[in-house]
């Protein structure tokens, strides 16, 4: 299952900002360098709705949009967004170690 916090973290890293939190969604505003339609926002469903059918559908649609905006592989993003924070940290540590050996 895609974790909304991972998606939020990815978007923040890319310069997106939290525009507003509603009763059901986080509204993320793109940075100026990302060319989008005027007033475009990503509407990410809050975690408290993760057990509803719309949550997973919404998160997959957002992941697909992110993959198109940044020209990244959808399945790679879906896998990344589905990991726990601990798994992502472990992956980063392994990757850094491998890269240090190459340099």
Image (spheres, rainbow, N blue to C red):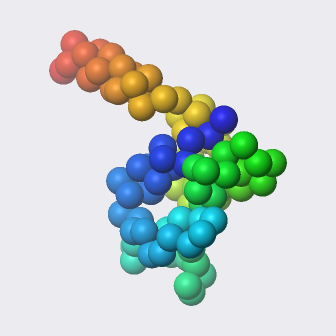
Q: Left or right of 35: which side holds 94?
A: left
**Image coords of residue 62 (percent x, y):** 64, 56
Q: Left or right of 38: which side holds 13?
A: left
- Between 74 and 78, the residue placed more toward the observer is 78
Please tell me whether residue 102 is drawn above or below residue 63 in the rendered image. above
Q: Is residue 31 visible?
A: yes
- Between 55 and 15, the residue placed more toward the observer is 55
Please tell me whether residue 24 is drawn above or below residue 100 in the rendered image. below
- Between 68 and 26, the residue placed more toward the observer is 26
Q: Left or right of 49: which side holds 57?
A: right
Please tell me whether residue 55 is drawn above or below residue 80 in the rendered image. below
At horizontal 55% and vertical 85% (from top left) the residue drawn is: 39
At horizontal 52% and vertical 29% (from top left) the residue drawn is: 83
At horizontal 67% and vertical 51% (from top left) the residue drawn is: 49
At horizontal 63% and vertical 58% (from top left) the residue drawn is: 45
Q: Quadrant of the C terminus?
A: top left
The part of the image, by quadrant, that contains residue 54 is bottom right
Q: Is residue 30 visible?
A: no
């Amino acid at each position: 299952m895609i974790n909304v916090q991972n998606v939020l973290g990815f978007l923040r890293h890319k310069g997106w900002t939290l525009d507003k939190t509603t009763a059901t969604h986080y509204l993320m505003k793109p940075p100026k360098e990302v060319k989008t339609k005027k007033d475009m926002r990503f509407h990410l469903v809050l975690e408290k709705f993760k057990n509803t059918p719309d949550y997973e559908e919404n998160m997959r649609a957002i992941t697909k949009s992110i993959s198109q905006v940044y020209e990244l592989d959808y399945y790679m993003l879906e896998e990344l967004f589905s990991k726990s924070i601990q798994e992502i940290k472990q992956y980063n540590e392994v990757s850094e170690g491998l890269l240090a050996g190459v340099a």
